[in-house]
Amino acid sequence: MSVKYIPVQWNANKWKYDAALIVAVVAYILIYMEVGTPAAGLERPLDNLILRMRAFGTCAFWMLTFILCIGPLARLDKRFLPILYNRRHFGVLTTAVAFSHAVFVVSWYFSFSPTDSYVALLTSNLSFGQVLGFPIEALGILALFLLAILAATSHDFWLAFLSAPVWKSLHLLIYPTYALVVAHVALGYLQNSENQTFAFLLVGAGLTVAGLHFLAWDKERRVVAATTDWVEACRPEDIQDKRAVIVALSKEERVAIFRSGNSFSAVSNTCAHQGGPLGEGKIVYGHVTCPWHGFSYKACNGRSPAPFTEMIPTYNMKLDDGVLYIDRQANQPGTDVEPVIYEVADNG
Amino acid sequence: MTLIMIATWYLYAGAAVAVWFVLYAIGRLDENAESAWIFRPLLVPGVLLIWPLILWRCTVLWRGEDKLDRHRMPRKKQDRAAIVFVFAIPLILILAIGLRQDPSDLAGPIQLEAPK
């Protein structure tokens, strides 16, 4: 038994997040139009259409850049976690902005000939054999198609229906999408060598995204534990009360060690509902609570309270010389495990 | 023209799958979707775009062939994708910057004589 799907799971924080996003997008476009007109030397009324197209295009690019920074930033520093949880709404809004850019492009550059706009879009430049002058329209169309897939499959239902491995593999398309967008801009507007500021910004954005991904990958590579049965996790004092520390047992497996007062329990970091990161949640009313949808489990056996039936694996732990160790071998989901008791000096 | 025609037929097929999937199939495949109707229109764009994948998943679920580790994220795959990405982005930028033309190399505009 679980909860029924609803269109959008909003709460007070998500309302604020979405409102801030929309205000930021509207402000960016208005400022771009206001500042960009004299800066680009575009003063005729018609030039506004070109500027509007650029405003939406660059806005979508910055949004996508920011989205791709959120994941590695959250892995590098927990303070970025709050912006991770509503990333799906961010992605959907980015797709809408990118789609607006595409509509403005088609309605401006391809609307004044007897040829159908879409035929003209696909056939006006067919120089696929050369890099300079490559049809950047094709790169943009493909990126928009992939973005649309990501946005259209962002509802919780898709994660459950496709299963986590398939859904996540599908959403790895964000990487080729960003590469296509970078190529679309780099082989397009970047070739306007008079605008050095934009060149610096584009290169800076691309290298920042790539650099953050490398740092996050390198950090995870270092924390994957050695190949012993008992894996050194952390000191009990390192865990805040009602919170958890996440430990990587391997590339695929993560464990969340929760502390409730002086009691310590380890469960799988993956929520059985939608694969949410349990270790980023907290203990609420005595239950481990998933930060994504509030699904909860007893820390001592990984079982959801009745009438729910979801279960997650538990792990045996031991305390040795003031350090918590986790048994690499997971217990069957729902297995009772005696918590480790340790008197923590600072009970905060 | 051929590409546009293929895309159009792909979407028509997706629309047919969407009607069947949204009105009939999901209520039988996911207990959390039973009698939950309001969210279903949100699924239509997704069905239009990835309907072959949906048909495959329906087959897997109906045959009971779904894997037991269906909640486990494919972290190794993500790591590999991220590493390719880390190298691809600078490569694209270096290539594009290398192709940039110096404005001083470009000839200025020439005013042509009016035809006589």
Image: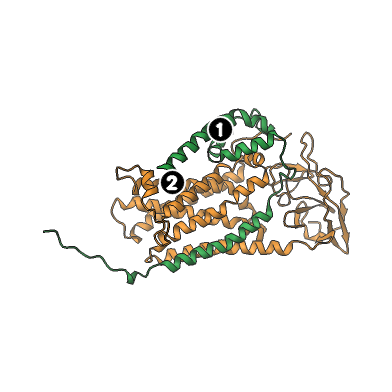
Chain colours: A orange, B green
Mark 1 against mark 2, which lies toward the viewer?
A: 1
Q: Which residue: 44% across, 43% down?
A: B3
Is disc 2 surrounded by few (<14), some (14 to 19) or many (20+) residues within 10 Å?
A: some
Q: Which residue: 54% across, 35% down?
A: B44
**How far across and how far down the image is residue A138, in percent?**
44, 51
How many angstroms separate mark 1 from mark 2 (CA)?
27 Å
Which chain is disc 1 placed on?
Answer: B
When the figure is inspected, residue A200 is found, relative to residue B45, above or below; the finding is below
**How far across and how far down the image is residue A191, in percent?**
40, 63
Answer yes or no: is residue A48 visible. yes
Left-right relation of B34 to A260: left
Disc 1 marks a residue whose amino acid type is Val
**How far across and how far down the image is residue A311, in percent?**
78, 41
Disc 2 marks a residue whose amino acid type is Ser
Indicate the quadrant where residue A293 lies: top right
Q: Which residue: 47% across, 48% down?
A: A97
**How far across and how far down the image is residue A168, in percent?**
64, 48
Task: Indicate which disc residue B17 carries.
Answer: 1
Foreground of the two, A19 or A134: A134
Do the residues at discs 1 and 2 belong to one chain? no
Answer yes or no: is residue A342 visible. no
Indicate the secondary structure of the residue bearing disc 2: helix
When the figure is inspected, residue B25 is found, relative to residue A185, above or below; the finding is above
Is disc 1 surrounded by few (<14), some (14 to 19) or many (20+) residues within 10 Å?
A: many
Left-right relation of B52 to A38: right
Which chain is disc 2 placed on?
Answer: A
Foreground of the two, A298 or A102: A102
Q: Name the residue under label 2.
A: A100
Indicate the quadrant where residue A74 lies: bottom right
Indicate the quadrant where residue A247 lies: bottom right
